[in-house]
């Protein structure tokens, strides 16, 4: 007797065989994440409570503790974990003595080592920007506070919740005893907000060991542009400068000496005013000429992106922007360089009045880098230009220009399979097509990973467009945190089906 399977069942079996994606237990994993969201929020609360401000040497013990907590969390999950010593950093010099502090160790972890699977490396950081209640926070920045589904706290969005979402992703697979579809590695650092000291050297040292079998690098240290989920394919670099003007041997009384000396502050303001025009045009010769031209394809991509200019103005509290159409605004935010003057050190800036002529003032300004700019060339262009402008003033004061950061831009190919996988994962979780966006800020480690390993990178953000990174009242919405974890679960499944190199 020959048994015949019902045609519906045959169709189902055929579908599963021809479409192995159908074997993916997404609903089961998604339900697990939903049922554990309170636990996830509590873990984020514990992490936010650690004041891991990497810019404050007095908070360095908190940075070390944050790395230990991260390592312990991954170790408790059965990961192969190491705390990698990346050396010391000179904090200050006094006469002939230098004082050093240990840099926070970098956490590496590994889950799975199946050579037949793809291997991804997730990068993140757990240090934060400075924050104080008196800066204008509505809540204690180091006590995660849930208000209307928003989780307020320093580092919540940048970058503790995204790091935890990747960890929860691995936890979900483990808890349900579902094999991870790919091998997952982590590199988590504690100095990103101050330039990732020591990390470049560590990545170079690990290239032929920890990173040798990595196929792709995933970074979630960025955010969406609007309420629509996004995939990020580019970031600007950054050249950060100090311009120091030194005059008298000490500060002077402006009543006694004003009108008799050529003041360093006047010189400094004079040369800063020659960097950029009121309309935003960079005046340093050679900068604009180096910028890669805007292609027709890019223009079309910018046209299709969801972005509301009026909401943008309202969010930042301004009545007018530099440009009044979406394409120009996005292009100048992402793929053109900008000059920003950040502050002046040595000037009188405290409350009250003080009639002082500062003897030495230092301007701090930066130029965001874009393809095809080269930081080494920009350093020479800026230095030569400011020296020539200063010389025309015929001032007896001394000018010294130094570049203290020279981070390159990063740009990926949006047609790479990593981005196709990203689109599929976003479609599964959010049921929309993602925007393809660039970041105006700088994530220098992306370019380092690319240059050192030669591997492809995707930035997969889950942060909201209104999270307030580096600002007062930073937050991560509960929705983005939980649905972002599901996005990472879906993404690992999609990456598993890419053709292995």
Image: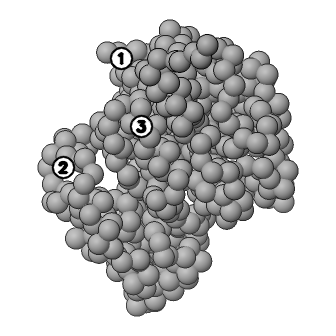
Query: Residue 84 versus residue 400: which sits nearer the camera?
Result: 84
Q: Can you give x and y, in whole percent of width and height, for residue 136 in the image?
A: 36, 30
Q: Residues within 10 Å of mark 2 (few under 14, many from 20)?
A: some
Place residue 253 in its image quadrant: bottom left
Location of residue 47 with respect to 470 vertically, above or below: above
Q: Can residue 300 be seen from the camera position used here?
A: yes
* Quadrant assignment for the N terminus: top right
- Relative to the observer, which residue lies in front, 35 or 94? 35
Real-space CA distance between mark 1 and mark 2, rounded to the nearest whole angstrom = 25 Å
Name the residue beneath numbered marker 1.
149
Observer-nearest residue: 116 or 43? 116
Q: Is residue 29 visible?
A: no
- Relative to residue 351, is residue 90 drawn left or right? right
Q: Secondary structure at mark 1?
A: loop
Residue at image position (25%, 47%) is: 306
Query: Disc 3 designates what residue?
Result: 426
Query: Who comes first in sequence, dot 1 or dot 2?
Result: 1
Does dot 2 land on a helix, a strand or a loop?
A: helix
The location of residue 317, given as percent across then percent down, is: 21, 42
Residue depicted at x 47% and y 49%:
420
Q: Front-most of 261 and 26? A: 26
Label number found at residue 309: 2
Tell me the residue at 34%/59% (across/down): 333
In terms of sequence position, does the residue under pointer 1 or pointer 3 come before the other? 1
Q: Would you say 324 lies left or right of 171 here? A: left
Crowding at mark 1 (Cα within 10 Å: few <14, some 14-19, many 20+): few
């Amino acid at each position: 007797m020959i048994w015949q399977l019902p045609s519906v069942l045959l169709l189902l079996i055929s579908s599963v065989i021809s479409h192995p994606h159908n074997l993916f237990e997404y609903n089961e994993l998604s339900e697990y994440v939903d049922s554990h969201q309170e636990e996830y929020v509590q873990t984020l609360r514990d992490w936010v409570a650690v004041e891991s401000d990497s810019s404050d040497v007095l908070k360095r013990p908190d940075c070390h503790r944050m790395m230990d907590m991260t390592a312990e969390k991954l170790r408790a999950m059965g990961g192969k974990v190491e705390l990698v010593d990346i050396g010391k950093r000179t904090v200050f010099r006094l006469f002939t003595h230098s004082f050093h502090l240990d840099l926070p160790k970098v956490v590496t972890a590994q889950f799975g080592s199946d050579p037949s699977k793809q291997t991804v490396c997730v990068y993140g950081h757990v240090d934060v920007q400075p924050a104080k209640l008196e800066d204008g926070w509505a809540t204690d920045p180091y006590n995660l506070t849930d208000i209307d589904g928003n989780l307020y706290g320093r580092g919540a969005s940048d970058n503790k919740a995204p790091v935890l979402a990747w960890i929860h992703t691995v936890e979900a697979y483990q808890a349900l005893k579902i094999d991870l579809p790919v091998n997952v590695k982590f590199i988590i650092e504690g100095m990103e907000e101050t330039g990732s000291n020591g990390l470049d050297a560590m990545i170079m040292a690990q290239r032929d060991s920890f990173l040798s079998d990595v196929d792709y690098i995933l970074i979630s240290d960025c955010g969406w542009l609007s309420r629509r989920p996004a995939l990020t394919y580019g970031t600007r670099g950054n050249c950060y400068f100090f311009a120091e003007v030194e005059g008298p041997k000490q500060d002077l009384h402006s009543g006694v000496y004003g009108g008799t000396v050529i003041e360093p502050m006047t010189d400094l303001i004079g040369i800063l005013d020659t960097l950029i025009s009121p309309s935003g045009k960079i005046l340093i010769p050679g900068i604009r000429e180096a910028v890669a031209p805007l292609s027709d394809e890019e223009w079309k991509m910018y046209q299709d992106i969801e972005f509301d200019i009026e909401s943008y103005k309202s969010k930042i509290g301004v009545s007018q922007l530099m440009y009044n159409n979406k394409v120009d605004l996005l292009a100048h935010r992402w793929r053109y360089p900008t000059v920003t003057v950040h502050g002046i050190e040595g000037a009188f800036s405290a409350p009250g009045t003080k009639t002082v002529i500062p003897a030495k003032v230092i301007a701090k300004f930066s130029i965001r880098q874009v393809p095809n700019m080269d930081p080494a060339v920009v350093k020479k262009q800026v230095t030569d230009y400011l020296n020539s402008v200063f010389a025309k003033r015929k001032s007896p004061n001394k000018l010294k220009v130094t570049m203290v950061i020279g981070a390159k831009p990063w740009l990926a190919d949006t047609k790479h399979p990593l981005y196709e996988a990203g689109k599929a994962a976003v479609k599964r979780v959010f049921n929309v097509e993602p925007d393809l966006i660039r970041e105006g800020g700088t994530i220098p480690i992306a370019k380092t990973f690319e240059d050192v390993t030669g591997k492809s990178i995707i930035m997969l953000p889950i942060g909201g467009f209104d999270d307030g990174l580096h600002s007062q009242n930073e937050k991560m919405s509960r929705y983005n945190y939980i649905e972002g974890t599901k996005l990472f679960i879906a993404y690992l499944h999609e990456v598993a089906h890419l053709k292995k190199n």
